Amino acid sequence: MATLITGATGGLGNAFTIECAKRGDTLVLTGTNSIKLDAILSRVKTEFPDVKVFARTCDLSSEEARKGFFEWLKEEKIEIDFLINNAGYITEGEFLLHSDEEILKVIRVNCEGTIDVTQKVIKMRNKDIPLHILTVASLAGYYPMPYMNIYASTKAMLKNFMIALAYEMKKKNVFVTTICPSGIPTTQAMKDAIASQGAGGKMTMSTPEEVAKLGLKASKKHKVVVIPKSINRFIRFISMFVGDKALAKIVGKRWKKSQEKRNFKSEETK
Ligand SMILES: NC(=O)c1ccc[n+]([C@@H]2O[C@H](COP(=O)([O-])OP(=O)(O)OC[C@H]3O[C@@H](n4cnc5c(N)ncnc54)[C@H](OP(=O)(O)O)[C@@H]3O)[C@@H](O)[C@H]2O)c1
């Protein structure tokens, strides 16, 4: 039995990989960047010589690549009992400035690819063994989010999908957990975004290690949804009493200000 981690090449994916290696899980790592995939593969092999680890690139936005990946799992006789849907394509900025390709990529990676992988893993499971699925959505998925609209909307879709799936699967030995983090300083873009929000950004952020540990713990306890940090849970609670239109205004103003500090283009300045 093995743990499949999508987006194992990224900041949070690396943290999930190391935490799962510490538990002694057999690992299957994916991403699209073969150099980064080799790097995390070598790290696991060096730091955890007793852990069995497989790695293969798979572009989640491609149906063909996903098919090939699952054929490979079959050929290698790898059975999955833990799926970590961590891969995600993060994008921000004015809606009108996104290219067609970028819009499709966000939707394909964050929604289509993740949902397809989830169904394929559920279908290939050994029904006698519990299957755990942990999906990384985002706190952004709780709000209408101007200037990060497409990304936040894909995460809203994913969060709702996974919560509903948890209900559908609960009597089928499949346990679905969703984690909704606020900022995580993984890429330079996310570090800059967190810094541009000053004290608020610092207070609400979590490290990749914190998110990975919390996600694994929540999955083990069969929690359906978990939000890292009490301040984020408090903000989420308060926001339930604010209408969507007002929320969009509050979030939009804050995000626009953050992007202006980082010299983002707007349609007028393009
Ligand atoms: N950073 C934050 O502030 C934050 C907050 C909330 C939620 N999240 C979520 O956390 C997850 C991890 O993000 P991160 O912060 O660790 O960012 P990251 O370092 O950019 O990692 C993103 C991962 O997704 C993979 N990915 C992107 N496009 C892909 C594709 N077409 N096919 C397969 N894999 C693909 C990347 O793999 P390659 O590089 O190999 O293509 C990479 O491993 C994402 O789902 C993100 O939405 C992040």
Image (cartoon, rainbow, N blue to C red):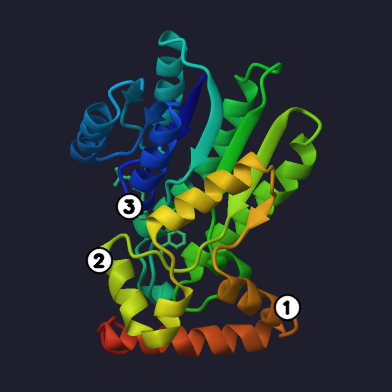
Which of the 4 image quarters holds residue 81? top right
Work out whether 60 lies above or below 141: above
Q: What element carries label 1?
A: loop
Q: How far apart are marks 3 and 2 (CA)?
A: 11 Å
Residue neighbourhood size for the residue with mark 2, other residues' Cα within 10 Å, grouped as few (<14), some (14–19), many (≥20): few
Asked whether the beta carbons under mark 2 and mark 1 sit within 8 Å of each other, the answer is: no
Name the foreground residue: 163 vs 246. 163
Tell me which amino acid carries mark 3. Gly
Q: What element carries label 3?
A: helix
Q: Mark 3 points at which residue?
A: 11
Q: Position of residue 247 (x, y in %)?
A: 62, 84
Q: Name the residue under label 1.
A: 240
Name the foreground residue: 88 vs 204. 204
- Kindly tell me whether mark 3's CB lies below 8 Å from ligand 1: yes
Q: Name the residue under label 2.
A: 188
Tell me which amino acid carries mark 2. Gln
Which of the 4 image quarters holds residue 62? top left
Q: Is mark 2 on a helix, strand or loop?
A: helix
